[in-house]
Each structure stands twice: as C-alpha cells, then as structure tokens.
Image (spheres, helix red, strand yellow):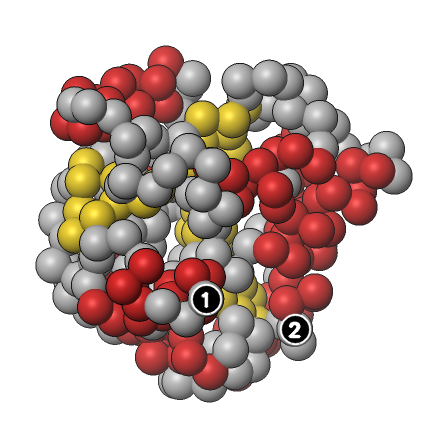
C-alpha cells in the first residue's frame, strides 16, 4: 500500500488527476470507478479543468458508480446517479450511457445487483477506482461487519453513516434512506488500482486502521491491505494518527523518478 501525505485536498486532487490523465492517454477506453461524497469533489473539479483545457477526454471511457440509495425518487438531487451527473459526468464528454450505477429502485434488487456485477465484468473490470472512507471505516456502503468477500448487494446503513450523510439532506437524519445498494468489498478489490482519498481530522481514526491496523470486517477498508496496487492519499489532519507518517513522507519524497501513484 502506497501512502501519500499531501498538504491539502487540491494537492491530492492534482496527483490523482495526473494518474487518470496518464491512464486515459494510454488507454482511451479505460473503465473508471466513481465515488460520491465530499472526498472526490476536488478531483472531479480538477479533471473538469483539464478537460476544458483539452488535456483529457472521456469520450471513449466508461465508468461505474460505487453505490446508490434505495427508494429515492429518480429526480432527487441526492440520488447518487444525479450527484455523479452534476459533479463529473455532465461536465465532461462521457458518451451517453457510458456511466452506469446500481439501481436502487429496481423491483428485484438481488437480480439488479447480479446484473450490475455482470456489467462490470463484461466491461473488463475497473481500471482505476476512486474511493473515500467513512468515519467508521466503510468504503462504498460496506458498513462494519461486511463480509470481505461480499459482492454488490443491498445493505442497511448504520446510524453513524446516516448522521454523517444528513448534511446532504439539510441536516435531517430521518431524510437519509436506511438502505442502499453497494458494490461489495470483493467487487471493489477486483479493480486494478484503488485510489482512496481522505481529508480532515474526522477521518484520522479510520485512516489509522486502514493503513496500520489489522485486517478486520469491523474496519472494512482494511481489506485494501491485500490489494496489489492500493494508493491512499491524505492531508496532514487525516494522517495525524499514523505512527509511520514520517516514513511515508520520506518514501514518497525519495521514490524513483519513474514511479507514479
């Protein structure tokens, strides 16, 4: 696992955008994994700037979303398909239908989950998956206790996650759905490159467990320790609990010239 400590969200976004730009330059039909929440927003803004400058095109690319709420109306602003459209998909040149997400309003949710798994596999898998991390260590909506071998399925959100996400619903916890459809931990681990971003002191405990703790379903993101190519980018606040923070800084500063993320 590569741990990269950067001064702020903008510096992190620049490094991640560099990696995505390199990926799309050598593989224009790459498959991206898109996350919602606050953590990726600076990345999406940077990619939009580069697209507008003519540096990067998504015209041949595809993308898959990590998760979706169950039961939100199709036009609800916090439905994740609408969030992704607003924050990145509608601001660049993805082809129509190139961005797919799990169906939180399907009549047969288990069948829809199986179909979503099949769609990712048919696309050849995700080349680069963007991730955030919850304060309780969840990635996507894989809450504590999730099977490390899980695939796309319906999950019940914890009270902590609903409180954390209430800020997107005008502060009303009761407006946050109780259920979601999410890629499983094994689904996420099938991506070729995992890129997790975390900023702020509220993520410090989760980042500590992710990077330096034991692999455990109680901290679902720790499964990333078993991935052959996982990159964790954090600001100083999110890195504040890391025991080996100085070492991670030294490793990144003195990495070989050819080594990127």
Badge 1: how crowded within 10 Å, few (<14), some, or many (20+)?
few
* Marks 2 and 1, the one that precedes in the sequence: 2
Tell me if residue 142 comes above or below residue 10 in the rendering.
above
Q: Is residue 152 left or right of residue 244?
A: left
Please tell me which residue is depicted at 47% across the width and 56% down the height of the picture. 37
Q: Secondary structure at mark 1?
A: loop
Mark 1 highlights which residue? 170
Looking at the image, do the residues carrying marks 2 and 1 touch, with CB atoms under 8 Å apart? no
Q: Is residue 80 left or right of residue 91?
A: left
Please tell me which residue is depicted at 27% across the width and 64% down the height of the picture. 174
**Residue 124 badge:** none
Tell me if residue 37 comes above or below residue 236 in the rendering.
above
Tell me if residue 164 comes above or below residue 141 in the rendering.
below
Please tell me which residue is depicted at 52% across the width and 82% down the height of the picture. 237
Q: Secondary structure at mark 2?
A: loop
Q: Is residue 131 left or right of residue 140?
A: right
Badge 2: how crowded within 10 Å, few (<14), some, or many (20+)?
some
Please tell me which residue is depicted at 21% across the width and 54% down the height of the picture. 178
Q: Quadrant of the N terminus?
A: bottom left
Q: Nearer the viewer, residue 79 or 199?
A: 79
Image-quadrant location for residue 221 = bottom left
Q: Position of residue 110 (x, y in %)?
A: 15, 27
Tell me if residue 243 comes above or below residue 218 in the rendering.
below
Query: From this viewpoint, is residue 117 visible?
Result: no
Furthest residue in direction top, as rendered: 122
Q: Position of residue 22 (x, y in %)?
A: 69, 37
Q: Position of residue 208 (x, y in %)?
A: 35, 76
Mark 2 highlights which residue? 8
Q: Is residue 146 left or right of residue 14?
A: left
Image-quadrant location for residue 143 = bottom left
Q: Nearer the viewer, residue 128 or 92?
A: 92
Q: Position of residue 245 (x, y in %)?
A: 48, 81
């Amino acid at each position: 696992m590569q741990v990269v400590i950067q001064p702020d969200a903008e510096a992190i976004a620049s490094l991640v955008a560099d990696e995505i730009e390199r990926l799309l330059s050598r593989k224009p039909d790459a498959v991206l994994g898109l996350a919602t929440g606050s953590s990726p927003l600076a990345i999406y803004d940077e990619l939009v700037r580069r697209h507008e400058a003519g540096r990067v095109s998504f015209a041949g690319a595809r993308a898959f979303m990590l998760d979706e709420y169950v039961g939100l109306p199709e036009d609800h602003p916090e439905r994740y398909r609408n969030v992704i459209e607003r924050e990145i998909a509608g601001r660049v040149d993805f082809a129509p239908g190139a961005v797919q997400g799990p169906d939180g309003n399907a009549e047969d949710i288990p069948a829809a989950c199986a179909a979503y798994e099949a769609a990712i596999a048919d696309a050849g898998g995700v080349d680069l998956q963007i991730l955030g991390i919850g304060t309780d260590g969840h990635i996507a909506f894989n809450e504590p206790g999730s099977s490390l071998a899980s695939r796309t399925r319906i999950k019940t959100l914890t009270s902590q996650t609903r409180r954390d996400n209430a800020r997107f619903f005008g502060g009303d916890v009761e407006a946050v759905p109780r259920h979601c459809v999410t890629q499983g931990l094994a689904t996420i681990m099938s991506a070729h490159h995992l890129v997790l971003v975390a900023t702020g002191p509220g993520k410090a405990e989760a980042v500590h467990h992710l990077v330096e703790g034991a692999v455990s379903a109680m901290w679902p993101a720790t499964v990333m320790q078993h991935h052959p190519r996982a990159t964790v980018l954090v600001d100083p606040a999110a890195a504040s609990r890391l025991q080996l923070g100085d070492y991670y800084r030294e490793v990144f500063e003195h990495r070989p010239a050819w080594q990127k993320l």
